[in-house]
Image (spheres, rainbow, N blue to C red):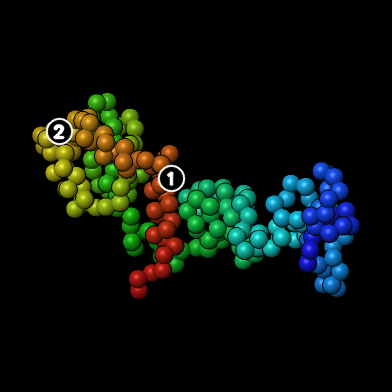
Amino acid sequence: MAVRANGGPSGASGGADVERRCGLVDDDGRACPHPAQPAAPLPLCAGHLLLAHDWVEREVGTTDLLPGPCPACGSRVGVRYPSGWICAECEWRYGELPDRTLDDDPVEVVYYLRYRDQVKIGTSANPRRRVASLPHDEVLAFEQGGRLLERARHEQFAAFRGAGTEWFEVHEALLEHIAGLSAGVHDPWAQYSRWVSRRLARPSRD
């Protein structure tokens, strides 16, 4: 259908301030009589814009506060769909409980801790407990992996390693590696929580 302005056909001359009409046709075949919203990218009236918004919202979800903290990562932000909520941070389906525990399939990480002018490179399947037991000023980064990855990192930075320890001198090469791991990561613990929640949410191997 042609979009009409001020009752005239689209494109008709009649001054610079020509009011656009809504370009939709109702179910009864009649053109919508309401004016289009001036700032809308398509010639739609307020009512039809709201209908379009509600339809898109059902398809892509609406970001809002979760009914409670995410049980996996603790985030309060979620995306609401007609079928329920998911966590916006870790994509956990809110309200679902895992059919297994993390003990069945732990997330091993290699951790990088700074204490004064030294960096410790270690590994753990329970980094919260492990890190709490170690002297440190800052958790610099995590990367997913276990003993093999830890050994590879120890060999990679062996020139800066304290004899018989897992502590390394702060060096440009080590700092560049840590910077690569932490790029875009505001909180290493939040990153670890996402890894845990995704591990729990993935189907069991049984």
Q: Could you say which is closer to the camera, residue 54 or residue 41?
A: 41
Does label 2 or label 1 sit earlier along the sequence?
2
Q: Is residue 20 above or below residue 142?
A: below
Query: Badge 1: how crowded within 10 Å, few (<14), some, or many (20+)?
Result: some
Amino acid carrying label 2: it is Phe
Q: Secondary structure at mark 1?
A: helix
At which x and y percent is residue 107?
33, 55
Identity of the residue drawn at 44% across and 62% down: 201
Q: Is residue 156 above or below residue 88?
A: above
Identity of the residue drawn at 50% across and 48% down: 74
Reading the image, the residue beneath label 2 is: 160
Reading the image, the residue beneath label 1 is: 190
Residue at the extreme front: 13
At which x and y percent is residue 30?
86, 69
Q: Quadrant of residue 22?
A: bottom right
Image quadrant where one finds the N terminus: bottom right
Amino acid carrying label 1: it is Ala
Q: Secondary structure at mark 2?
A: helix
Q: Could you say which is closer to the camera, residue 59 or residue 34?
A: 34
At which x and y percent is residue 100?
41, 65
